[in-house]
Image: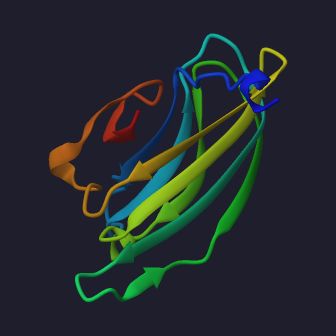
């Protein structure tokens, strides 16, 4: 029965948007899955999409992208994709699925509209840089 299905809680896995600070380059950001657990997470898959509805009811959507990241060792981060400032006004959703502890884990991480901004940057676990983190 449905009540018998265990849905494990995702802890110590995050998604972070980090600004690329390479000198002489145009402003760019990259999105990472951060494994701040003490063990590896395996078969990591991420789907990403952007969407919003304006005050007139017009919908804007991006394509759904699927990313197979494989294994992410403990206390490391893996780049999911670059993200351009043109989509920052959208809700940017990252659905992360992985195996750990012989269980399937999944969690939806959403950067809300206009939340990928320098004012909201904080320390990103594992990467030791500033970025916008969805906990």
Quick check: 70 left or right of 29?
right
Furthest toward the left, the residue is: 119
Q: Residue at x 32, y 86 (%)?
A: 57
- Residue plotted at (55% across, 52% down): 94
Locate residue 98: give its quadrant: top right
Q: Quadrant of the N terminus?
A: top right
In this rendering, the answer to whether 19 lies above or below 13 is below
Q: Which of 32 and 65 lies nearest the eye of the viewer?
A: 65
* Residue beneath the point at 29% across and 63% down: 113
Left or right of residue 55: residue 3: right
Which coloring applies here?
rainbow
Number of labels in the image equals 0
Q: Quadrant of residue 124?
A: top left
Q: Is residue 58 above or below residue 96?
A: below
Residue 85 in the image, given as x and y percentages of width and height? 34, 71
Image coordinates of residue 109 in percent, x first then y, are: 48, 45
**Quarter of the image where the C terminus is located:** top left
Residue 10 spot, x, y in % from top left: 58, 25
Is residue 109 shown above or below 75? below
Residue 27, placed above or below residue 21: below
Residue drawn where x is 15% and y is 48% of the image: 119
Residue 111 x, y percent position in the rendering: 38, 53
């Amino acid at each position: 029965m449905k009540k018998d299905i265990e849905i494990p809680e995702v802890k110590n896995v995050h998604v972070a948007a980090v600004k690329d600070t390479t000198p002489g380059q145009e402003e760019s950001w990259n999105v990472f899955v951060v494994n701040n657990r003490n063990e590896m997470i395996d078969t990591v898959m991420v789907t990403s999409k952007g969407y919003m509805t304006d005050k007139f009811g017009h919908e804007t959507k991006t394509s759904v992208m699927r990313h197979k990241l494989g294994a992410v060792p403990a206390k490391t981060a893996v780049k999911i994709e670059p993200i351009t400032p043109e989509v920052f006004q959208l809700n940017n959703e990252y659905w992360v699925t992985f195996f750990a502890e012989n269980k399937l884990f999944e969690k939806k991480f959403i950067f809300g509209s206009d939340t990928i901004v320098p004012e909201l940057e904080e320390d990103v676990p594992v990467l030791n840089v500033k970025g916008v983190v969805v906990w």
